[in-house]
Structure formats: C-alpha cells, structure tokens
Image: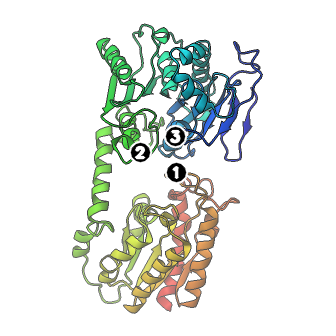
C-alpha cells in the first residue's frame, strides 16, 4: 500500500491498493467545502477511500485504538467535529485514532451541503441516492478495521483493543460493522453516536458481540433518537454489554461542537467508559497505572481535582512534616531541595543519596513555579536551611497550570531566589532537565524552550551571586532531549540519570556554602 506523511505527521493510507472495488467507474476527485449551511469544514466526493492515522506520543500510548467514521448523510464528511477533533482528544489520552474517509454519493456542485439539504426535502430522494453507496461505505469501514489490525505492531496498537466510533451516517457504518464480522474486521468495542441505523444493514448480534457505548439527544431533528434506544435494547436483551446516554437537548450532529449544554461533555463520558473497561491503561502490564483499579484511578483524579480547587499550591502536602523539623543544629549545613516530580522522584528512586545528610526533599509532582513560589516560605524559609536547590520550570513549559512565557517562569524563579537571599539562604539554581516531548502533553516541542530557559537561568545566576548547576549538558542528546538510558519516559530521570545529577549538585552545594 502507498503510504505518505502530511506536514503534521499524520499517516494517510489508501484503503485499497488500487481502485476501490465497486466504484471502478468513479472518476471524480475528493474536495473540501468551508462555506456551507453546516458551518463547518466538510469533505465530499470521496471516491478513493483513505484512513488517516493520528498517533499519540509513544511515551503515552496505551495500545488502544479507535477507528472513526465521520457523519454527513453519505454526501459529506464532517471531518473536524466528528473526526479530527475526536482523534486529538483520544491522542491526549494515549489512544491511537484513525479517521476514515469512506465513499460518498457524487455531488454535482461545489456546495454538497446545499445539495444534501435539497434532497432531504424531496421524499425518497436522499434514500434513493444513498442506496447504492451505503454498502460501499460499510465495506470501507470493515476494511479500515482490518487494516488497523493487520498493521497493529507498526502502529503500536494492541490488536485486541481496536474499537470503532461513528457519527450519524458514520454511525450507520459503525453499527453495520457490529454484525457479520470475521476475525480480521471484528471491532473490540463500538461507540455509535446519534447513529442512523438502517434495517438493511442490521443482522443478528453474534455471541461475542462487542460492548457498545451509545450517545444521542432526544430532540434529534432527524428523529433518530429511537435508533439509539433500539440498539441499546437489542444489545441488553441479548445479554451483551451496553451503555446509553440520551440527552434531553443537543439536537443532531453535535459532535465535538461547544454549545454550552450537557452534550458538550459526552466524550468525557466515553472516556469514563474506556477507563472503566481498562482501555486507558497501557498494554504493558508493568506500567504504573496497571497497579490500580479503574475505581482507584478515578478516586485519585477526584482527589487531585479537589486539591487543585481547595489547595492550589498543595500547601498541606508538607505541613505536618515541616512541624517535625527541628531547628538546625550548630554547624549543620542544611539543604532544602525545592522542585517538582524530578525532585520528588529523586528521593524515591535513590533514598540513599539523602540518607544521613542534612538534606530535606520538598518536591511535589506536577508543580509549576507559581505553585512553588506560594509555598516557598513554609517549605523552605521556615526550615532555616543554609542552601536551597531550586529545580523547576519544565511543568510550566508543559502548561500544567496554564499558558506561560519563559519570562514569567524566570520571574517566579528569581522571586524564590531573592526571597531565599533576603533570609540569608544561599541559592543553587538548577538547569531544567532535557525533554524532547511530554508524554502527558505531546506535541509541545519543549526541547528548544528548555534550552533557552536554561540560558536565562544561567545568566541570572551569574549576575546575582547564585550557583548554577548544569544537568542539561550532562544529560542531553543530539535532539536536546533526555539521553537514552537516563530516563524511562523521556522526561523523568531513572536511577542512572540521578547518579549523573548527584555529583553535580553536591559540587554546587559546596560552592554555595563557600560564597
């Protein structure tokens, strides 16, 4: 099969090696329209069906895949809100997504939506035009599932975790794939979204029929809400697994559109469903997420969200521990390590580095510099160290607490340093550890930003009597990312990484104490 890559690194592949079987005489070319009654970009005149892969960052990929069939009445494809936007949402959760452009009715003008709406006003016209094309679209759907399964290894997909999602007419394709499948094109789960279910495309659900997640709105303008209810009833009456979300309002075709109504969050419910089924857990049994049940993961997320609302800087994290810290003994060279998960993980992965030394670890995973600044007095100054080692900034670049600039990150770092100096505490400013990409926020291209931020940190440290410790140069590869063997996810050091950092910071602490 011919394979090419677009500028945004999505893999686009024809579904068939040559002309698609059944449409050999189709000579028209695929086109797009942005100015139409639907007020969204649509694709039309698809004669050569394709599948476009949207793959998550390899560090965050969990092995689950969803093949997506956008809707559009078999005349168009709502390629964004029912295709690409869904794929990107899935990618952020580690799920591989594949948007299918299946074959459509030939549009005779450059406004396929106007043609479609016109046909809908003529009884029987739309169904007559769709009739010969729907079997071809369903064939494309089954071929797409089989293609993903046959390429699972190279796509980093688990061949037993390939699901489908279809919207409206795409829901016709998706529900048809729930029947009469074989081992190659069987979906492992399905999500028909306000589907149009044609009796001709239905069959008898097999004993191993996959679980389904169904969404629709009661006020669907096309009157399709009963289709979803019937599918749900069929599934549970045959003792198959099903979940139905029927919203009172939302109409037809809401997809990923934001309307400020409950249907805006339907895809979050799909995420909950995937999580409860274990489909957001990595296929690797040794991954940390697999140590927890879905309920435990949900509880952890709720606790994190609650803490963010009520204790944004996580001031409570070390409050009790700080009360137990006695005043420094005479001659004690106490050092506080202030930072994020890299600092916190340091104490977990190499506790011997801290054992028997006047070192206090105050790292909190996920934190950004404004959060650290808020807790700096209680977690550093109040402990009366002689030296503070500040390692922060990467989570700011990742946008953990919202968009920020390098200058704003420096403002927070320098504010912490100045607070320490005003209390007679020597400061060691650390370079940010190299990272080529963030597993939890793929595609941000942080490497160059980290490099520039480190230059700013070094310059400020040189001008303000601080010691700069350069982890970056000792740990970066040719891409300015974390060198292979020094971390398991490209961001956080492993034990080998910390063993490189330790003599560097020990030397920096010694230099600070002499200042």
Q: Earlier in the sequence, mark 2 or mark 1?
A: 2
Disc 3 or disc 1, which is closer to the eye? 3
Label 1 crowd bin: few (<14), some (14–19), many (20+), radius 10 Å: many
- Toward the viewer: 152 or 128? 128
Residue 357 is situated, as x and y percent measured from the top left of the image, at: 38, 74
Label 2 crowd bin: few (<14), some (14–19), many (20+), radius 10 Å: few
Checking the image for residue 288, the label placed there is: 2
Under circle 1, the secondary element is loop
- Residue 31 visible? The answer is yes
Disc 3 or disc 2, which is closer to the eye? 3
Label 3 crowd bin: few (<14), some (14–19), many (20+), radius 10 Å: many
Residue at point 59%, 61% (across, down): 446
Residue wearing tag 1: 439
Residue 127 position (above or below residue 283)? above
Residue 227 is situated, as x and y percent measured from the top left of the image, at: 38, 20
Under circle 2, the secondary element is helix
Q: Earlier in the sequence, mark 3 or mark 2?
A: 3
Q: Earlier in the sequence, mark 3 or mark 1?
A: 3
Q: Is residue 57 left or right of residue 256?
A: right
Residue 438 is situated, as x and y percent measured from the top left of the image, at: 54, 55
Q: CA distance from mark 3 to mark 2?
A: 33 Å
Residue wearing tag 3: 81
Q: CA distance from mark 2 to mark 1?
A: 14 Å
- Residue 162 visible? The answer is no
Q: Is residue 3 left or right of residue 201?
A: right
Residue at point 52%, 12% (across, down): 181
Residue at point 36%, 34% (across, down): 273
Residue 277 position (above or below residue 232)? below
Residue 197 position (above or below residue 442)? above
Whether tag 2 and tag 1 are in contact, CB under 8 A, the answer is no
């Amino acid at each position: 099969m011919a394979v090419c890559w677009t500028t945004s690194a999505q893999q686009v592949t024809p579904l068939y090696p040559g002309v698609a079987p059944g449409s050999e005489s189709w000579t028209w070319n695929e086109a797009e329209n942005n100015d139409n009654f639907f007020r969204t970009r649509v694709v039309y005149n698809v004669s050569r069906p394709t599948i476009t892969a949207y793959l998550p960052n390899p560090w965050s990929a969990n092995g689950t895949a969803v093949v997506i069939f956008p809707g559009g009445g078999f005349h168009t494809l709502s390629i964004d809100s029912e295709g690409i936007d869904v794929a990107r949402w899935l990618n952020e959760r580690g799920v591989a997504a594949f948007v299918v452009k299946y074959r459509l009715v030939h549009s005779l003008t450059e406004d396929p939506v106007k043609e479609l709406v016109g046909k809908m006003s003529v009884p029987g016209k739309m169904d007559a035009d769709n009739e010969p094309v729907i079997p071809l679209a369903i064939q494309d759907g089954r071929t797409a599932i089989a293609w993903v399964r046959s390429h699972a290894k190279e796509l980093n997909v688990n061949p037993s975790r390939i699901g489908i999602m279809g919207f409206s007419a795409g829901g016709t394709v998706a529900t048809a794939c729930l029947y009469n499948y074989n081992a190659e094109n069987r979906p492992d789960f399905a999500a028909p979204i306000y589907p149009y279910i044609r009796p001709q495309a239905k069959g008898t659900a097999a004993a191993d029929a996959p679980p389904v997640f169904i969404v629709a709105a009661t006020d669907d303008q096309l009157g399709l809400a009963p289709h979803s209810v019937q599918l749900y009833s069929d599934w549970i009456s045959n003792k198959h697994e099903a979940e139905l979300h029927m919203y009172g309002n939302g109409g037809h075709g809401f997809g990923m559109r934001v309307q400020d109504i409950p249907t805006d969050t339907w895809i979050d419910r799909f995420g909950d469903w995937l999580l409860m089924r274990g489909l957001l857990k990595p296929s690797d049994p040794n991954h940390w997420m697999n140590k927890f049940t879905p309920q435990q993961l949900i509880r952890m997320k709720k606790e994190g969200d609650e803490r963010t609302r009520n204790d944004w800087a996580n001031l409570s994290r070390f409050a009790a521990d700080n009360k137990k810290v006695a005043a420094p003994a005479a001659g004690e060279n106490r050092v506080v390590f202030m930072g994020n998960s890299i600092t916190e993980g340091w104490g977990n992965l190499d506790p011997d580095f801290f054992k028997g030394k006047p070192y206090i670890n105050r790292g909190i995973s996920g934190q950004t510099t404004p959060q650290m600044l808020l807790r700096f007095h209680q977690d550093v100054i109040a402990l009366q160290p002689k030296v503070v080692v500040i390692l922060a900034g990467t989570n700011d670049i990742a946008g953990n607490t919202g968009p920020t600039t390098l200058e704003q990150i420096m403002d927070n770092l320098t504010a912490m340093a100045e607070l320490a100096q005003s209390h007679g505490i020597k400061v060691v400013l650390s370079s940010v550890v190299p990272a080529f990409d963030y597993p939890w926020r793929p595609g941000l291209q942080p490497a160059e930003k980290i490099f520039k931020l480190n230059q700013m940190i070094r310059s400020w440290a040189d001008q303000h009597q601080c010691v700069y410790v350069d982890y970056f140069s000792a740990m970066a590869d040719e891409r300015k990312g974390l060198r292979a063997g020094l971390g398991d996810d490209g961001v956080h050091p492993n034990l080998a990484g910390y063993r490189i950092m330790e003599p560097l910071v020990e030397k920096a602490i010694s230099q600070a104490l002499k200042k």
